[in-house]
Image: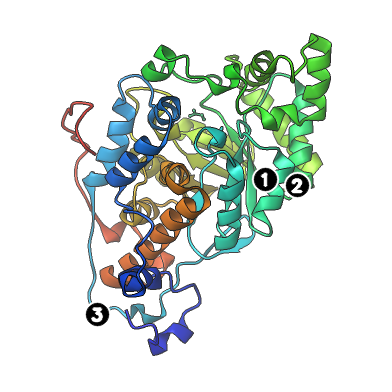
Amino acid sequence: MDPKNPNRDARSSPQYGLYQRENFWKSNDGQVPPFNTEPGKLEELAKAKLTENGWYYASSNAGQSHTHTANRQSFYRHRIIPRMLVDTNTRDTSTEIFGHKVPAPIGFAPIGINKIYHPAGELPVAKVAGELGLPYCLSTAGSQPIEDVGKANGDGPRFFQLYMPHDDELTRSLLTRAVKSGFTACILTLDTWQLAWRHDDVNTSNYAFYHGIGADLGLSDPVFQKRLKELGIDPVKQPNEAGAAWIDNVWHGRAHTWEKVKWVMGVWKEISGGKPFCLKGIQSVEDANKAVEIGCHGIVVSNHAGRQVDGAIASLDALESIVDAVGGKTYIMFDSGVRGASDVFKALALGAKFVFVGRLWVWGLSIMGETGVRHVMTSLLADFDILLNVAGYRNLSDIDRKALESGLKAYPLLPVTWKL
Ligand code: GLV
């Protein structure tokens, strides 16, 4: 790629594709690219770096991993139709999300307990997201205080993912902290009142919070600190009990209903002055309709990357029907199973306005901390930029269902060990 390409000045979004050139050139300067970003290799490298528990948690899925498998299979069902001789010289990857102009339709999905992947936890991830100007979502199960994550993220757009406790004062406190720390949207997750049955995690007692790791977001909360006093738990002397008290408030195992969602929407509106409120974990048309009916600003079509309901439909398949039903009525985001730029493209073509990725950056963080997250995400952006160039799509509005040839939902049964 010619770095002096005269068209570079005609481009209104970054020339991410140049990252390919940077890496191709590296060995001339006695350097090597940080690591191979092919998803299978990323996974292997992360596995080699992590503790057994870190690895199990990063890779765990619900039950037999059938939902994870379906997520990946559904991407193969759709094939991109490349177009030739399209003037992609002025291509633009940028878009808008909740009033933020962002350089690409790609964001950092909320993932908790980053300290099990890297000692600095969420901070390097938020920092890199801020640098790239891509939305960063902080999980309520995050292992750093909300305030510190906000600072690390700088001027980047950031959203707070809420796991709603059954303690309303605590919910208010978390949302207040998020607003004060510059988080500009609330994303309420609906599919995780508790973690699903994940064999390896259960078999190895792999629940970091019960072992005194990762409760920092809760331990730094004034209302939760009050709760610990009421319970007579000293977080310094009893880190396991304190961590357990926190996570038992977050993944409490007690379902909420639509009435409570309306309540928390109101609370968020009051605290944030009316900033966007979204629901994450929507997989059915009925629930998408309901979300629109109660006035949510957006939904994330997600099956939690296959980590919650085993044997469920692929999130990409759910996306299609949901877009047909409520596409024009709410802002539709997507996650679950994205492993590369072509997956991002396919989700956009099926009607998502924005795509979040999770495991890719978790692997990057595990392999090489901040450098790893930067490398993985910059590579994904470069891959996306190059894909638009070689496939002949100038911008996101060019990408619609006509860009795909889609097969039937006739997935072969595959053994769990089949490499996806
Ligand atoms: C939590 O969100 C998890 O999937 O473990």
Q: Which residue is mark 1?
A: 149
| 391, above or below 401, in the image | below
> Mark 1 or mark 3: which is in front?
1
For the C terminus, the image quarter is top left
Asked if the residues shown at circle 3 and circle 2 are in contact, with their CB atoms under 8 angstroms apart, the answer is: no
Q: Residue furthest bottom?
A: 6
Q: Amino acid at mark 3?
A: Leu
Q: Amino acid at mark 2?
A: Ser
Kindly state the secondary structure of the residue where label 2 is placed: loop
Rate crowding at label 1 as few (under 14), some (14 to 19) or many (20 or more) other CA atoms within 10 Å: many
Kindly state the secondary structure of the residue where label 1 is placed: helix
Residue 85 badge:
3
- Is residue 170 or residue 59 the one in the foreground? 59
Q: CA distance from mark 1 to mark 3?
A: 44 Å
Residue 417 appears anywhere in the view: yes
Asked if the residues shown at circle 2 and circle 1 are in contact, with their CB atoms under 8 angstroms apart, the answer is: yes
Image point (59%, 21%), residue name: 209
Image point (53%, 24%), residue name: 192
| 65, above or below 389, in the image | above
- Is residue 140 or residue 66 the one in the foreground? 140
- Is residue 213 or residue 184 the one in the foreground? 213
The quarter holding residue 19 reads: bottom left
